Amino acid sequence: MNVVILVGRLTADPELRTTSGGTSYCRFSVAVDRNFVKSGEERKTDFINCVAWGQQAEFISRYFSKGRRIGVQGSIETGSYTNREGAKVYTTDIRVDRVEFVDSKSESNSSGSSYTGNRTAQNYDQRPSTPEPSYSSGSENDFATTPVDDDLPF
């Protein structure tokens, strides 16, 4: 299984490019804070290279910009090439399958914004979108009471 999910900020504006065969792509880097902090140290950040192809690339280059929070789902791809000095260089990229807005455009312009859940998240992937279910009209009567019994199967 090769699945990656990232939430972070773009380090630069994504730039749309086209291969010689006419396929659109864009490369970008996402700054992702680590979850843990050693005592007495500052939080560390990883800068993760991503690549998107086709419609995903066009969407990202059109609607995302430097500093904007982005949610990325994809897979790790590794590769290598020989540079001009003849040394072999190994690469690791996230191949983007899906992206999400994590904040609104106005929140991205202010520092210290936080994730506010599905209220502002908008999905963009290859599947048709379906509306989120609404649970606002529910009540506690919608739940069944489980009898307390020592013979539960777990």
Image (cartoon, rainbow, N blue to C red):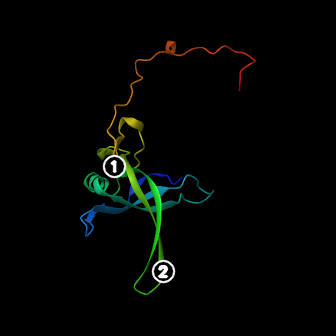
Residue 118's label in the rendered image is none
Kindly state the secondary structure of the residue where label 1 is placed: helix
Q: Position of residue 92 (x, y in %)?
A: 47, 66
Residue 108's label in the rendered image is 1
Q: Are marks 1 and 2 in contact (CB under 8 Å)?
A: no
| Of 92 and 100, the residue lying toward us | 92
Q: Residues within 10 Å of mark 1 (few under 14, many from 20)?
A: some
Quadrant occupied by the C terminus: top right
Residue occupied by mark 2: 88
* Quarter assignment of residue 37: bottom right
Report the number of numbered marks.
2
**Vertical placement of residue 54 versus 89, above or below:** above
The three-letter amino acid code for the residue at tag 2 is Lys
Left/right of residue 61 with respect to residue 50 in the rendered view: left
Q: Residue furthest front?
A: 21
Specify which label sits upstream in the sequence, 1 or 2: 2
Q: Residues within 10 Å of mark 2 (few under 14, many from 20)?
A: few
**Vertical placement of residue 139 versus 11, above or below:** above
Q: Residue at x 33, y 46 (%)?
A: 126
Q: Position of residue 140 (x, y in %)?
A: 51, 15
Q: Position of residue 15 (x, y in %)?
A: 28, 63
In this rendering, the label closer to the viewer, 1 or 2: 2
Residue 15 shows in the view: no
Q: Residue furthest bottom?
A: 85
The three-letter amino acid code for the residue at tag 1 is Ser
Q: Residue at x 32, y 58 (%)?
A: 53
Q: Residue at x 42, y 82 (%)?
A: 83
